[in-house]
Image (cartoon, rainbow, N blue to C red):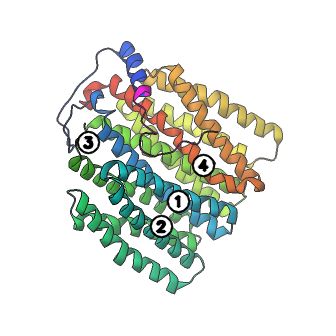
Amino acid sequence: MVRPRYGVGVLRVGRLVAMALVIAAAACGPLGDGGASPSASPAPGGIASLDSRAADLRVRLNVLLGEHVMVIAKQADAAAAGRTDEYAGYATLLTTNRDDLVAVMTSAFGASAAARFEGLWSEENDHLVDYTIGAITHNGAKAKAAMSDLLTSFVPRFAEFISSVTPLSADGVSALGRDQAGQQKAFIDDLAGKSYARFFADLRAAYGGSAALADALASGIATRFADKFPGAIGSKGVELRVKLNSLLQEDSYLASMTTGSLAGSRNTEQAAAGAALTASATALAGLIGDPFGADAKAGLLQVLGDRNAELVIYSSTNDDARRQGALSALTGAYVQQLAAKLRDIMGLDLPLASPAIQVQVQSLIDVVDDQLAPASAAQIADDDRTAAATMLPLADLIAAATVTAKPEAFA
């Protein structure tokens, strides 16, 4: 299987979005256009703003910084439970995430400045890993030293670097860096204390909080390098696209955490993971459905809830017939129902939506299969990222169809 990556250019879905727009425009009539955008590089709002390079930059940074939070959490969870092969996989994924961030910085600043970013980001990862180890092993001195280094060494030097290559102030970046470090510390501490309800709540808060740094970086880069990243970065349509990408990625990663707890019979985690997945699904259904009314929101939430129920069965039952039934429901009924909902709600064409949903659900099933097979533990992280990455083209299709169907709401 080809592994999707989040590096520069790889997730540009302009052609895919353009196809959606052509089909949706034929069904829904004229496209809306621009109002004032709060972006650093002004451009029309509405559909015209969705596929700009500035918008791509913002989406990419939100996805990568959100993923960074999830990988730290998954690595910490594996370490706390002694799942060494799984831990190693997420440690490798942490490096891959860094490399993709470096690719974004190279596209903006050039190789020399990107190399400085790489060194700083590697240092941050090292401090977070050291803090995780210290917290989980109850080595207070190690944990305290790692967090002190993160806050007093990495954060100010990272802020100074960013302020040297963008118009962002060092004080502002420092504040964002400290906030993110505090949020990450919170969920690591929760894991060390085996407080899973708090862990998932704090994880979602940290994941959502990563958007503040991502948006600031995207705005600063687009302002400083408007020739490289033209277009709107803060239009209503771009806001929707960014949030859809982030929430769909979160949904995938929380789904795999839920199935992992079930496949591993980690009873103390199961309820908390499931509650977090439900909360994410509720937010996702609201984001997609709200422009179209309460019935659309309720229908989407029902479809996502049904999917989650089948994932529970597939990852936890020892009954082969029930497991096969869940697999059939996931790859058949769920794909058809979600695609039909998106068509009925916003006019998203079935030949576009169905394959994207099918690929994503099969990728998530691959993760569950890894989780159920001890010999495949080292593969979990790689397949987990693949499943999350396959959500992103679907996010862009939904954003394009929504803005096309409701141009007045995104002008």
Amino acid residing under circle 2? Asn
Give the magenta part as a residue range: 1-16
Instruction: Determine the main secondary structure of the stretch shown in magenta.
Output: loop
Can residue 243 be seen in this snapshot? Answer: yes
**Is the residue under label 1 in contact with that under label 2 (CB below 8 Å)?**
yes
Q: CA distance from mark 2 to mark 3?
A: 29 Å
The count of marks equals: 4
Residue highlighted by disc 1: 94
**Is the residue under label 2 in contact with that under label 4 (CB below 8 Å)?**
no
Residue at the outermost front position: 112
Residue highlighted by disc 2: 125
N-terminal of the pair, mark 4 or mark 3, is: 3
Q: CA distance from mark 4 to mark 1?
A: 13 Å
Residue 112 percent coordinates (x, y): 34, 59
SS under mark 4: helix
SS under mark 1: helix
Residue highlighted by disc 3: 234
Residue highlighted by disc 4: 384
